[in-house]
Amino acid sequence: MLGLRGGNMHFVLYDPHLREIEDGAELTALLGQAHAEGRPLYVLYAYPYKNRDVRPDAFESLDDPALFQEEALLHAIFDERMVRVLRWTGRAPPGGAG
């Protein structure tokens, strides 16, 4: 399970093994590793406006329906705090890594 920090990283309270990613290059590398190992991969994030501003390269992959599908939307009082859970489709990452 991967996570994008937006506000605080409260996700680790629910899953202490969650790995925080910083950018698209790291996401692509981890997709390549998951592809090579035949493992599933999930990404979760909140604060979409802030995350898209700070990590636009990660969202090039996260917004690609061939690579990721929304698995769950966890509602919150404020839209910005809703948590989106994306499931990687298993397709090879951009650039053929993996």
Image (cartoon, rainbow, N blue to C red):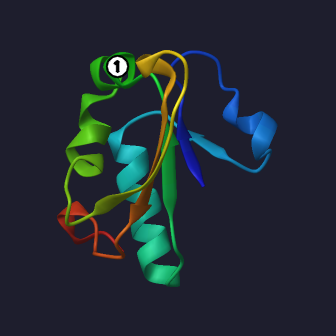
The image shows residue 80, relative to residue 98, as above or below, that is: above
x, y percentage for residue 7? 56, 15
Residue shown at 35%/45% (left/top)? 25
Q: Quadrant of the C terminus?
A: bottom left
x, y percentage for residue 54? 34, 19
Residue shown at 39%/68% (left/top)? 32
Tell me: 14 left or right of 98. Answer: right
Report the front residue among 69 and 17.
69
Q: Quadrant of residue 60?
A: top left
x, y percentage for residue 70? 37, 55
x, y percentage for residue 39? 54, 78
Q: Amino acid at mark 1?
A: Val
The image shows residue 44, relative to residue 29, as above or below, that is: above
Q: Quadrant of the N terminus?
A: bottom right
The image shows residue 7, relative to residue 35, as above or below, that is: above
Element class at badge 1 = helix
Tell me: 48 left or right of 7. Answer: left
Report the front residue among 45 and 95.
45
Q: Which residue is mark 1?
A: 54
Tell me: 14 left or right of 65. Answer: right
What is the total number of numbered labels drawn onto the structure image? 1
Q: Quadrant of residue 52?
A: top left
